[in-house]
Image (cartoon, rainbow, N blue to C red):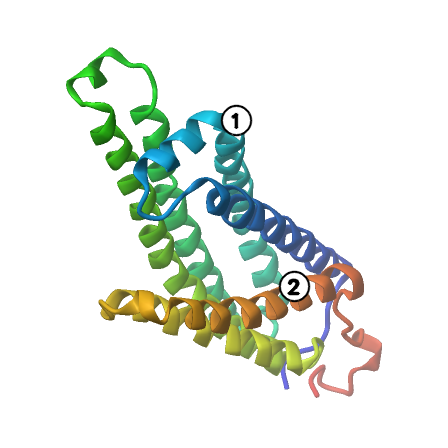
């Protein structure tokens, strides 16, 4: 078993991880499911452009929320490393690296959501394009964003896999949460590689999205709430037998 001695600051890191995770979940759902899914009309560039122009502030708010999400991702990566380094320092560092790689990719990919704002603006250099071309390019940028997000989810999937193992082995977080995180990671990876490898992916999208979203949502919300409300329960030094390890 790992060294289960833990100090007060580490307990604080657990709460920070839980709060950061909650902010990530809320901002991510707002940006992807509340804003983009309501404004983007698949296959209809003109309607999508009209929606973005008509709700520009809302569209910009989705970008801002993702910036908050990515900032919290960095904080959560650090906090989770501190919480689980006592289980396996190398794996805790690997999990942090995977999460930071995910955040970096998603951050760069966020540029694709700024492109429609530029294309649908009133800059004079855009007059060389007709409106239909501008609308098509804006939708293309948003499609590229969805695939860029997909690349980031590969790294996030591996993060969840390593984190799930650390949770399972820790002894101070319910093992079921580790199993859920591992199951969620498999869903992320299967969906990401299916989108990449299958030209017929749209035929299975509804099924695969359900297989990914439901387990991932349950796993991440449960883990988030455990860290935030329960924290981590690790016996102090006085409870450890001679030698400091179980």
Tell me if I can see residue 75 in this picture. no
133 displayed left or right of 177: left
| Residue 29 in sight in this render | yes
Residue in front for this viewpoint, 219 or 172: 219
> Circle 1 — which element?
helix
Return the x and y of residue 122 as percentages of the image width and height. Answer: 32, 15
- Rounded to the nearest whole Å, what is the CA distance between mark 2 and mark 1? 28 Å
Query: The N terminus appears in which quarter of the rendering?
Result: bottom right
Foreground of the two, 101 or 237: 101
The quarter of the picture where residue 169 lies is bottom right
Q: Please, which residue is most extreme toward the top here?
A: 124
**For residue 65, side relative to residue 131 (left or right):** right
> In the displayed structure, does residue 40 sit left or right of residue 11?
left
Pointer 1 residue: 57
Crowding at label 2, few (<14), some or many (≥20) Cα neighbours within 10 Å? Answer: some
In this picture, is 118 found above or below 9? above
Name above or below for residue 52 compared with residue 161. Answer: above
Image quadrant of residue 47? top left
The tag earlier along the polypeptide, 2 or 1, is 1
């Amino acid at each position: 078993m790992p060294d289960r001695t833990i100090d007060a600051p580490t307990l604080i890191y657990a709460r920070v991880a839980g709060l950061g995770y909650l902010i990530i979940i809320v901002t991510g759902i707002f940006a992807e499911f509340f804003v983009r899914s309501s404004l983007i009309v698949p296959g209809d560039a003109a309607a999508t452009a009209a929606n973005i122009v008509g709700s520009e502030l809302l569209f910009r708010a989705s970008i801002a929320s993702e910036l908050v999400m990515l900032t919290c991702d960095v904080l959560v990566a650090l906090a989770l490393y501190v919480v689980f380094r006592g289980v396996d320092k190398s794996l805790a560092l690997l999990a942090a690296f995977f999460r930071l790689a995910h955040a970096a990719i998603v951050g760069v990919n966020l540029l694709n959501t700024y492109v429609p704002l530029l294309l649908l603006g009133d800059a004079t250099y855009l007059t060389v394009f007709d409106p239909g071309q501008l609308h098509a390019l804006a939708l293309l940028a948003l499609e590229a964003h969805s695939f860029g997000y997909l690349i980031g989810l590969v790294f996030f999937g591996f993060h969840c896999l390593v984190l799930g193992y650390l949770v399972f082995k820790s002894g101070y977080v319910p093992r079921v949460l580790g199993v859920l995180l591992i199951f969620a990671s498999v869903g992320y990876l299967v969906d990401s590689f299916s989108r990449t490898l299958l030209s017929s992916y749209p035929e299975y999208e509804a099924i695969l999205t359900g297989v990914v979203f439901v387990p991932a949502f349950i796993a991440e919300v449960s883990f988030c709430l455990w860290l935030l409300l329960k924290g981590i329960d690790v016996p102090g030094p006085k409870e450890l037998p001679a030698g400091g390890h179980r």
